[in-house]
Image (cartoon, rainbow, N blue to C red):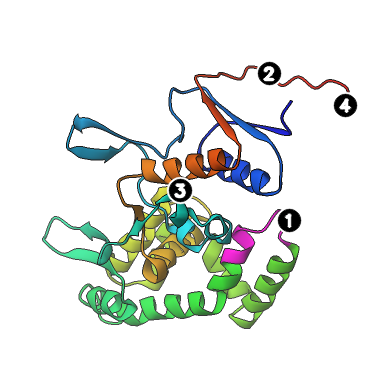
Amino acid sequence: MVDAVVIGSGPNGLVAANVLADAGWSVTVLEEQDEPGGAVRSDRAVHPAYVNDLFSSFYPLAAVSPVLAALDLGREGLRWSRAPRVLAHPLRDGRCAVLERDRGATADGLDGFAPGDGQSWQELCVLWDRLGDDIAASLFTPFPPVLAGTRLLARLRAAGGLRLARRLVLPVRRLGEEEFAGEGGRLLLAGNALHADLAPEAAGSGGFGWLMSMLGQFHGFPVPVGGAGALTGALVGRLRARGGEVRCGQRVSEVVVRRG
């Protein structure tokens, strides 16, 4: 008998398995599909010379995750690549909202949509300067994030309290309209909110759009060199090097508990 059975070999399952293995547990990961990775997979079905990411392809939360950093996947050969420009939203009239790696360059581009929108972007960045570290700590702390949450609440009060909290729970369409006169800034917020499958009118989509936009602004949207499957490969390789096992083609239908 192993100490832990992890059901599913997506990134969350593989990270959990690696953390348990580091703690000295024996771990087996069971995966229904023929290969590990869940939504973090690549193949060459388009062309033998071309690696295609099947589902997810960029990982801004990985860039700020202390959990992933502690796994030191570079030792398993994982390398990250960041594009000079993070993302772009073109319009039919030829204009384009661009999230640059430099906040000043992003702001300058947004001023081309409406004077003053660059300053609005800079103000959103200043909020991240004040809150970003505590937000990241809350995201990656076991629930409930008591210590990180307490620090974040204190920073929220100092940064505007209820007014800021209101902005974070707004639908992203409304937040964009309140923050930006032109389409550029609105597109950046809304496009990033859609990565969470949140509709522009959904409550809280504004906060998520801001979060993803700031991760892109400050950390880029890194991609694994060689495709998304390289991240899965590094996690699987690390686990196996520590005695863990990944068994594919194993569908789990029930969990049986005996003797407590």
**Which of the two labelled residues, at mark 2 and mark 1, occupies the earlier sequence position?**
1
Query: From this viewpoint, is residue 242 visible?
Result: yes
**Which of the two labelled residues, at mark 2 and mark 4, occupies the earlier sequence position?**
2
**Which of the two labelled residues, at mark 3 and mark 2, occupies the earlier sequence position?**
3
> What label does residue 108 carry, if any?
none
Q: Amino acid at mark 4?
A: Gly
Q: Amino acid at mark 1?
A: Pro
Cα–Cα gap, marks 3 and 1: 22 Å
Q: Amino acid at mark 3?
A: Ala
Between residue 98 and residue 242, name the one nearer to us: 242
Cα–Cα gap, marks 1 and 4: 27 Å
Contact, CB < 8 Å: mark 2 with mark 4? no
Expressed as whole percent of the image width and height from the top left, the position of residue 112 reads: 20, 76
- CA neighbours of label 2 inside 10 A, class few (<14), some (14 to 19), many (20+): few
Q: Amino acid at mark 2?
A: Glu
Residue at image location 43% in from the left, 41% down from the top = 233
The residue range painted magenta reads 136-145
Residue at image location 38% in from the left, 62% down from the top = 189
Q: Which residue is mark 1?
A: 144
> What label does residue 260 carry, if any?
4
- CA neighbours of label 1 inside 10 A, class few (<14), some (14 to 19), many (20+): few
**Residue 239 picture quarter:** top right
Figure quadrant of the C terminus:
top right
Cα–Cα gap, marks 3 and 4: 38 Å
- CA neighbours of label 3 inside 10 A, class few (<14), some (14 to 19), many (20+): few
Q: Which residue is mark 2?
A: 254
Give the mark toward the camera: 2 or 4: 4
**Which of the two labelled residues, at mark 3 and mark 1, occupies the earlier sequence position?**
1
Cα–Cα gap, marks 2 and 1: 28 Å
Figure quadrant of the N terminus:
top right
Expressed as whole percent of the image width and height from the top left, the position of residue 75 reads: 46, 55
Secondary structure under the numbered disc 4 in the rendered image: loop
